[in-house]
């Protein structure tokens, strides 16, 4: 008679990608947790193709300067200090370099914005950064629409989002679209 021993090994794993701006799981230091929406006034708005996966993103933030302008180039970019951001992937295929059209937030966006350079297509997230520029947490938009009009010289955005039933609305225009991205209004 032959005896077979079956051994089960259970391992606990932890993931924390301490990249700039956070990116770990909800309990990871430096980012990814859920936050409560608090209204803010945008000082900077920008449009860029996400470096890693060629998606067009917009970002609106209460931060200023070149670091704020660069936020949509990669969702893992840091604000460099305390502040707020709304980032959306337009997944635009029409209009170059101005992605004209109307882009609605779908109802099935994940709570986690993911690991790519862009957030999931057409999804939008509200983010809070701590004093070190790390992401404290994310909150997905539960509804929203961005309407874009323009051409190769300027691009105007009208953005409306809902975060847990609270509305955020802003509009901005970026110009000089023939220069390298990101295109920014600060």
Image: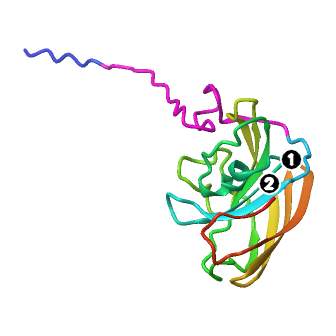
The chosen color scheme is rainbow
Q: Residues within 10 Å of mark 1 (few under 14, many from 20)?
A: few
Q: Dividing the picture into quarters, in which one does residue 134 lie? A: top right
Work out whether residue 15 or residue 171 is closer to the camera in this orientation and state it: 171
Q: Secondary structure at mark 2?
A: loop
Q: Dividing the picture into quarters, in which one does residue 78 lie? A: top right
Residue lying at 76% horizontally and 30% vertically, measured from the top left: 131
From the image, tell me which residue sits under label 1.
164
Q: Are marks 1 and 2 in contact (CB under 8 Å)?
A: yes
Tell me: 27 left or right of 84: left
From the image, tell me which residue sits under label 2.
142
Q: Earlier in the sequence, mark 1 or mark 2?
A: 2
What's the distance in space between the residues labelled 1 and 2, CA to CA?
7 Å
Tell me: 139 left or right of 115: right
In reply to whether residue 98 is colored magenta, the answer given is: no
Q: Quadrant of the C terminus?
A: bottom right
Q: Position of residue 93 (x, y in %)?
A: 60, 78
Q: Secondary structure at mark 1?
A: loop
Up the image or down, 138 lies above or below 108; here it is above
Q: Which residues are magenta?
A: 8-36
Residue lying at 79% horizontally and 69% vertically, measured from the top left: 146
Tell me: 115 left or right of 1: right
């Amino acid at each position: 008679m032959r005896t077979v021993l079956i051994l089960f090994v259970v391992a606990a794993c932890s993931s924390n990608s301490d990249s700039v701006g956070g990116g770990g799981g909800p309990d990871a230091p430096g980012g990814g947790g859920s936050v409560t929406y608090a209204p803010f006034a945008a000082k900077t708005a920008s449009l860029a193709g996400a470096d890693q996966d060629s998606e067009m993103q917009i970002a609106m933030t209460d931060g200023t300067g070149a670091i704020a302008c660069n936020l949509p180039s990669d969702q893992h970019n840091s604000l460099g200090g305390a502040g707020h951001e709304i980032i959306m992937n337009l997944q635009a295929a029409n209009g170059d370099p101005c992605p004209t059209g109307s882009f609605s937030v779908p109802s099935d966006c994940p709570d986690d914005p993911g690991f790519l350079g862009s957030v999931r297509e057409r999804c939008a997230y509200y983010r809070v950064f701590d004093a070190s520029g790390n992401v404290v947490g994310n909150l997905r938009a539960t509804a929203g629409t961005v309407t874009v009009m323009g051409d190769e010289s300027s691009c105007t955005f009208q953005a409306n989002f809902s975060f847990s039933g609270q509305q955020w609305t802003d509009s901005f225009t970026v110009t000089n679209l023939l220069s390298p991205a990101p295109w920014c209004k600060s």
